[in-house]
Image (cartoon, grey):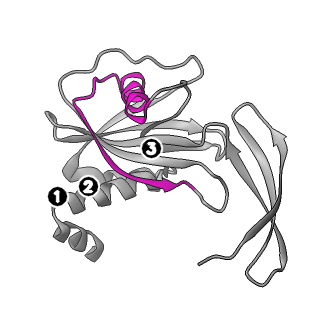
Amino acid sequence: MEKIVITWEETLHSGKFISQKAVNYQDKNWDNKSWEYASRENEWAVATLVEHTDNNTFVFVEQYRMPVQKRVLELVAGICDMENSTKDEILTQEVQEEIWYSVDSIKYILSTPNSAWLTDEITHLYSTKISGNASSQQLWASEEIDVIEVEKHEVFNFLKEKELSGIYISKGIYASLALYLYNQSPLAIESLLAK
């Protein structure tokens, strides 16, 4: 059990979406320590592995991310930016905006810190099923998102090719695929790890 006593906390800088915070604390030996971290105005986000059931594919998004100054292959995701919205509502909206589909079903998987040493943001991970045909993309003016549909049996080869081409792959993709495989068959994980 951690015996940490927070003695002081301060916001060093407040931006539109993110603040920089500092906290002083005493550790288990009563030594004074400090830590700085990023705090998101909305402390949670949603992300989902999208499965197109008619096409037997996964659907990802790829976009340029300014903090890493590269394109990143990601799960469909979004932050809580509407008051009184549920996580399911935000997720449904993001699927419609980013990849142009209506949601057939949503299944909650888990909640996890993004980078617990760096930020207080929590991501709630889901699995979403879609079917049929896409409608029209409804992005914000500042967004430029490529929608990428990958056959399930080719997904790991595809990810390797993307990585070799210089595209970053979001860790959420690997985590959600591992959980997807585990839910299909626990032995599938052992097979994947053996490669």
Where 143 falls versus 33 (above or below)?
above
Please tell me in which quadrant of the rendered image residue 129 appears: top left
Q: Which residue is mark 2?
A: 180
Q: Position of residue 39 (x, y in %)?
A: 69, 46
Residue 88 among those drawn in magenta: yes
Compared across the picture, whether 5 is left or right of 118 comes to right
Q: Which residue is mark 3?
A: 74
Q: Position of residue 160 (x, y in %)?
A: 38, 57
Which numbered disc, 3 or 2, marks the residue that appears first in the sequence?
Answer: 3
Which numbered disc, 3 or 1, marks the residue that appears first in the sequence?
Answer: 3
Q: Tell whether label 1 touches label 2 (CB within 8 Å).
A: yes
**Amino acid on which the number 2 mark rests in the picture:** Tyr
Residue 17 visible: yes
Q: Quadrant of the C terminus?
A: bottom left
Residue 90 among those drawn in magenta: yes
- Distance from disc 2 to disc 1, alpha carbons, whole Å, reads 6 Å
Please tell me in which quadrant of the rendered image residue 187 appears: bottom left
Residue at screen point 43% across, 31% down: 86
**Amino acid on which the number 1 mark rests in the picture:** Gln
Q: Position of residue 183 (x, y in %)?
A: 21, 58
Q: Quadrant of the N terminus?
A: bottom right
Q: Which residues are magenta?
A: 86-114
- Distance from disc 3 to disc 2, alpha carbons, whole Å, reads 16 Å
Q: Nearer the viewer, residue 114 or 29?
A: 29
**Amino acid on which the number 3 mark rests in the picture:** Glu
Please tell me in which quadrant of the rendered image residue 66 appears: top right
Report the label total: 3
Compared across the picture, whether 36 is left or right of 186 comes to right
| Mark 2: few/some/many CA within 10 Å (<14, 14-19, 20+) | some
